[in-house]
Image (spheres, rainbow, N blue to C red):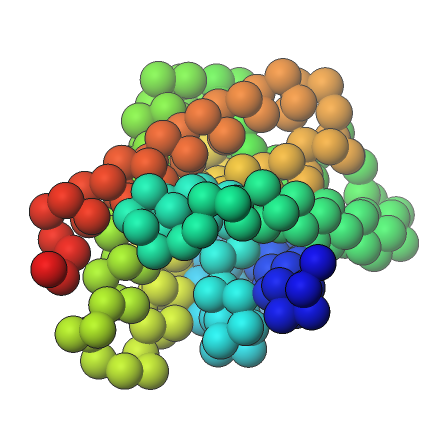
Amino acid sequence: MQSGFGRKLFAEFLGTFWLVFGGCGSALISAGFPQLGIGFTGVALAFGLTVLTGAYAFGHVSGGHFNPAVSLGLAAAGRFSWKELGPYWIVQLLGATFAAFVLLKIMQGNIDFSLANGFAANGYDEHSPAGFTMQSALIIETVLTAFFLLVILGVTEGRAPVGFAPLAIGLALTLIHLVDIPVTNASVNPARSTSQALFVGGWAMEQLWLFWVAPLLGGLIGGVVHRFTLAEN
């Protein structure tokens, strides 16, 4: 492995760790804290801030994907090498899972903690925060991931204002969570979903397929739509 590619993979590991640790950590630790809890809006903002800060910190090294669906969408758009897709997915999954492991160790220091409460895992039907069905989850995860890719691809083109891409991408992820948390707890990221499901097990692992299929499909749609209708000639 070339040292330059190793740096890319390490940056992706760190960025994905940061996304899961900051986003899921805010949901687990701060969202429902009595009186001072950050609530629904705060968790959505936390996810956006992790991507914003992570993109500025690591994006110049790895591209700042932090998400298998983003990597796939960028490849479909012709903006990322297909041969690098597998290694990126592996380190994204490792970074997300390590973040979930660290969060688990932190949460086990709270006497009221139980994995039975969900551990910020994604779900549908009875495991949807507001009781949304599998159909609703499939649709919203696909649509939101497709538009997330359209935002990412649009703001990183040559005509876009220089230096503002991470801000737009972070705000887009905040908006996605504002819409999607009641439906599925908001995924649009198979690594984020896998990391929590691995520790919850049971129903979370049984429903994990949706949080791979829908985001990957959405990523492909977004990448293809941009490549053939919106990209610079």
Position in image of residue 61 (x %, y %): 54, 73
Position in image of residue 70 (x %, y %): 42, 49
What residue do we see at 16% from left, 56% from top?
Answer: 231
Q: Would residue 112 be seen by someone viewing this image from the given angle?
A: yes
Q: Nearer the viewer, residue 202 or 147?
A: 147
Q: Looking at the image, is 207 positioned above or below residue 229?
A: above
Q: Looking at the image, is 23 positioned above or below residue 160?
A: above
Q: Looking at the image, is 4 positioned above or below residue 153?
A: below
Position in image of residue 121 (x %, y %): 61, 36
Q: How many marks?
A: 0
Quarter of the image holding residue 18? bottom right
Position in image of residue 98 (x %, y %): 77, 51
Residue 75 horizontal side relative to residue 198, left or right: left
Q: Would residue 183 be seen by someone viewing this image from the given angle?
A: no
Quarter of the image holding residue 173? bottom left
Residue 29 horizontal side relative to residue 101, left or right: left
Quarter of the image holding residue 30? bottom right
What residue do we see at 22% from left, 61% from top?
Answer: 154
Q: Nearer the viewer, residue 5 or 36?
A: 5
Residue 6 horizontal side relative to residue 31, left or right: right
**Quadrant of the image containing the N terminus:** bottom right
**Quadrant of the image containing the C terminus:** bottom left
Identity of the residue furthest to the front in this view: 2
What residue do we see at 62% from left, 47% from top?
Answer: 87
What residue do we see at 72% from left, 19% from top?
Answer: 202
Q: Nearer the viewer, residue 74 or 70?
A: 74
